[in-house]
Amino acid sequence: MADDGRRRATLIRRLSSRKQISVGQLLFKAARLFHERAMARVQARVPEAKHAHANLLPYIDLDGTRQTEIARRAGISKQAVGQLVDEMVAHGMLRRDPDPKDGRAQLVRFTDDGIEQMLHGIDVLDEIELELGGEVGAMTLERIKRGLVKLLPALERLEP
Amino acid sequence: MADDGRRRATLIRRLSSRKQISVGQLLFKAARLFHERAMARVQARVPEAKHAHANLLPYIDLDGTRQTEIARRAGISKQAVGQLVDEMVAHGMLRRDPDPKDGRAQLVRFTDDGIEQMLHGIDVLDEIELELGGEVGAMTLERIKRGLVKLLPALERLEP
DNA sequence: GCCATTGGTAAACCACCTTGACTAATTAGT
DNA sequence: ACTAATTAGTCAAGGTGGTTTACCAATGGC
């Protein structure tokens, strides 16, 4: 009994000396908050917009991209991409054209309307970055950005 | 018709001049990859561990924390926390004790087993940070960390 | 002593993604 | 040229990680 108490006390000492928020926790929470803030503003103009849509858009080239390629770039399954593209096509943001180079494939690309929505979305992001920059300093924001750009390839290489 | 073509060309010019990956995208992808990598290693020893569990742990004090407080810190609903705590209690990681100061409340705290699992989890995180540090430089990692710690409060203040 | 507030639960639902199985078109090997 | 393997995409089912609404019980301000 006394042994149990001592053992626990020892464990707690070891833990409390090392417990601190990890990069993973920080990334996760920051990502969630950032997207919440941004999407709330975008949805004020485009109510049907969703987080998952926004995450796909930067991987779609202006001259069209295959779904499989979008999936590969975004790091998610092609099935997930298919469904999201379905939704965005339904909302008039994207369209699918047959790929002249491959009878199986379709090129996903923006409609004119989609491009305008993208421009508005970018305005919102710039606005938020400006506000955040005002609070923490533009330099801090830029350092985070540069750091993440450097970190991402390393994360992708990392074997689980 | 020709007008439509010109209009689209103009839109595309404006978009392509501004399109660049945003902090939000970077955060989201980095968070997902980091958690995937870390959890895969943790699950090799503790198969029932889940991402959502890991996200809660840093908000549980060693001397016990109320679920409502955990929810507030983590930024999610108390119902979500309740379910996750249920699962971790079932796995012997946490336990619930009545709060002597409030008959409604329960203090969530670690079991001895839970503390050992936490220590192992921290080992994994340190290991990953070390590996990442080897690829991008420990300084870069530290800058990201500091930046995020600074950014988080600003994000929480930001009205959607 | 009443009543608004707070800690927690229950149940239904939703967003987002995965896995597995499949079809059809393409490319490689011989 | 003819298989055989690969690749683009779809369909369906299921799992994870939450939210919302509604509720109960204990608390505390007045």
Image (cartoon, coloured by chain):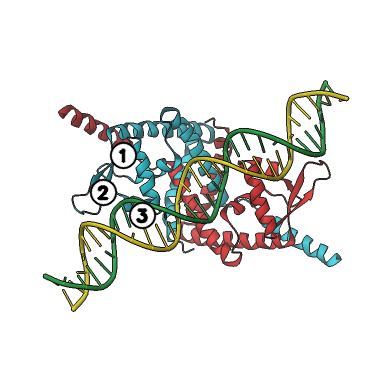
Chain colours: A cyan, B red, C yellow, D green
Q: Residue at x 57, y 63 (%)?
A: B43
Give the structural element (helix, strand or loop) at label 3. helix
Q: Are marks 3 and 2 on the same chain?
A: yes
Indicate the quadrant containing the N terminus of chain B: top left, top right, bottom left or bottom right. Answer: top left
User: Going by the image, does A3 lie left or right of A98?
Assistant: right
User: Going by the image, does C25 lie left or right of B73?
Assistant: left
Q: Amino acid at mark 2?
A: Gln
Q: Amino acid at mark 1?
A: Leu
Q: Residues within 10 Å of mark 1 (few under 14, many from 20)?
A: many
Q: Residue at x 83, y 67 (%)?
A: A3
* Residue underneath mark 2: A106
Q: Are marks 2 and 1 on the same chain?
A: yes
Q: Mark 3 and mark 2: span between their CA atoms?
A: 15 Å
Chain at tag 1: A
Q: Which mark is residue B98?
A: none
The vertical placement of A70 against D29, above or below, is below
**Labels 2 & 1 near each other (Cβ < 8 A):** no
Q: Residue at x 82, y 42 (%)?
A: B103
User: Going by the image, does A158 lie left or right of A101?
Assistant: right
Residue B117 picture location, percent across and down: 66, 62
Q: Nearer the viewer, mark 3 or mark 1?
A: 1
Q: Which mark is residue A72?
A: 3
* Residue underneath mark 1: A94
Residue B112 picture location, percent across and down: 74, 61
Q: Residue at x 49, y 59 (%)?
A: B132
**Labels 3 & 1 near each other (Cβ < 8 A):** no
Give the structural element (helix, strand or loop) at label 2. strand
Chain at tag 2: A
Q: Is residue B19 at least partly visible in the picture?
A: no
User: Going by the image, does A63 lie left or right of A35?
Assistant: left
